[in-house]
Image (tube, helix red, strand yellow):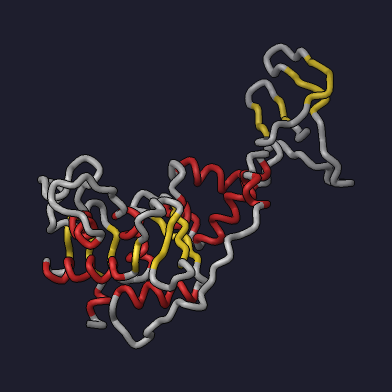
Amino acid sequence: MSSAILSSEVIIMKRLISRCPSCDGELVISTLQCPDCGMEFKSSFELSFFDKLSDEQNGFLLAFLRARGNLKEVQSEMSISYPTAKKKLDELLDALNLGSEEKCAEPKVVDLSRLNVDHGSNCASEIVKAKLKDHGGHTTVFTARGLPCEVYAEPDGETFTSDKLPTSPAFDYGIFDAIVELLLKQDGRARKGNGRNFKLGETGCEESTVVGTVALHMGHKKGDSIHDPVFVLAAILEWAGIAVNGRGELILTDEYRSML
């Protein structure tokens, strides 16, 4: 156990260490002392998982809590990339004995043999396909709230899936062209809309919103109850550098506009 310097006026506590500096063995607490009366309790007390965290892991945990679990904010605060933040989070979970058994599962194999890409095109669909193919057919994107979404290219070369989207009906890459067309009609920006609480055509889910455009592209008609996949689609467009995923709206990036 790390030492505590006691005096009649001040108590300076050093951070607890969990490994022996001599042999690297795991330490246990043998004595607890009351600084007020001096009473001591001698036994063998185990350290908690939190006590065993390294300074680096402890710092990441504090940053993660300050950001309320938002990895985007953690990345910004610590000036690290997503893969680094994700790795640190996985290491922290393992250190706290909270690691998921899913990590032992076989990774999903992505067949890219039919994913044909026109690298000279400025169509949003082709840009997304090209970037997804460059990433081996799988990537992680983040919603405006920092929620991670896994995105996969499907073997048919025409559709993609996400762990945050229903598997049926399939989402085709052309859906991104439909969204960009809407944005261009509205001077580069459009409201996302709300498909969870309103039917297609109702106020909040008009055809002029992103969710309304997506619903029409998926074959829905006015009055239909629809699924709202915009939070994932907007995250993909931001990842591809096509649009800014703002709160409540999508905005075409200057970089993409310059390509048109």
Q: At which x and y percent is residue 249?
A: 21, 56
The quadrant of the picture occupied by the N terminus is top right
Location of residue 68 (image quadrant): top left
Location of residue 48 (image quadrant): top right
Q: At which x and y percent is residue 216?
A: 19, 59
Query: Residue placed at 31% from the left, 53% from the top?
Result: 229
In the displayed structure, 118 sits above or below 206; it is: below
Q: Which residue is most to the right?
A: 23
Location of residue 117 (image quadrant): bottom left
Q: At which x and y percent is residue 76?
A: 43, 57
Relative to 152, 226 lies left or right: left
Q: At which x and y percent is residue 29?
A: 79, 28
Relative to 27, 129 lies left or right: left
Residue nearer the viewer, 151 or 252? 151
Is residue 72 visible in the rendered structure shown here?
Answer: yes
Query: Residue placed at 43% from the left, 74% from the top?
Result: 131
Query: Residue placed at 33% from the left, 60% from the top?
Result: 233
The count of marks equals 0
Query: Residue placed at 37% from the left, 60% from the top?
Result: 170
In the displayed structure, 154 sits above or below 76; it is: below
In the displayed structure, 61 sits above or below 238; it is: above
Residue nearer the viewer, 169 or 197? 169
